Amino acid sequence: MEKIQKASIIALKDYLGLDTKERLLVLADEGKREIGLALFEAGNALCDEALYLEMRPRELNGEEPPQAVADIMKSVDVVICPTSKSITHTNARRQAAQNGVRVATMPGITLDTLVRCLSADYSKIIELSERVALKMEKTSVVRICTKNGTDVTLPIRDRKVISSTGVLRKIGDSGNLPSGEVYVAPIEGQSNGTIVFDGSVAGLGLLKDPIVVEVVNGYIANIDGKSDSQRFSDMLRKVNHKEAYAVAEFGMGTNYKARLCGEILEDEKVLGTVHVAFGNNISMGGKIGVNSHIDGLIKKPDVYFDDQLVMQYGKLLI
């Protein structure tokens, strides 16, 4: 319990810069109650007013919280969200940030992730993330290749590159906590090729079998594989919207403490991996506003920024 409390204090004080005169909202659900209450207890000792609010778990990543919850999110100074499903790509999160609230989302957070990843030296994560972001900003096309069949190109020219470090101390800052990734919204309708997810997928966890996804002009055209592929197809079909199949994001993990565990919050931060997401990308400067965002992880890839090899079999070369 002492380690959990220490990690909770680090999250609120070091990463979110919670001040004694501020108001904190901890937004959780039943599945993440233990972590939510630990953060609430830490917040109570750090700030003027701490609130704990628990809602029904969402069914999908990207599903909106109730309007009453969204309204409360806009009325405080800091919001931290240990939830079972992600509310990162929701209007509620965006509107709170636009209102000046600092928002940290922690979808699928586990006690192990909380304790281990928040013990990382965030100055190292910042340095590496900024180095990758600087290189990505000068890139027109990203290409990902793997030995098991991935070969896809994602045009990103003139798109905003986001360095996500988990340090959210400025007015309106928002992002994942813990973090450590650099990501971008590829230009809609222009990504093409084959993606083989072999790590994990948001909402499915660690994969037993690779999921083979064919992308044509920015949309999933075909999904192949065994049982995990069917689960992936079912999840997309449940959204019941064409834009759920649209390429939304390319990202690279930059957190040296992150480990592959089946929770996409941590998995997509693992150094030596990349991820591609489908669905909503409004938050990262894209144009897709569907009510879902599903990330898939690729292990040990070769990655090219234009013609330059920047990652080889999962080893960063920049």
Image (cartoon, rainbow, N blue to C red):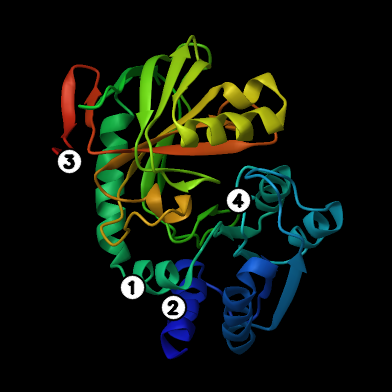
Residue type of the residue flagged with mark 1: Ser
Whether tag 3 and tag 4 are in contact, CB under 8 A, the answer is: no
Which residue is drawn at the image coordinates 50% and 78% (left, top)?
8
Give neighbour class at mark 4: few <14, some 14-19, many 20+ (Cα, 10 Å): many
> Are the residues at dot 3 and dot 1 in contact (C-beta closer than 8 Å)?
no
Front-most of residues 37 and 224: 224
Q: Is residue 291 above or below residue 5?
A: above
Between residue 144 and residue 172, name the one nearer to us. 144
Identity of the amino acid at label 3?
Answer: Leu
Q: Which residue is mark 2?
A: 7
Q: Which mark is residue 316?
A: 3
Taking the image as shown, residue 228 lies to the left or right of residue 127, namely right
Please identify the quadrant where the C terminus is shown: top left
| Mark with earlier residue (2, 1) | 2
How far, Cα to Cα, is label 2 from label 3? 28 Å
Q: Which residue position holds label 1?
A: 119
Q: Amino acid at mark 2?
A: Ala
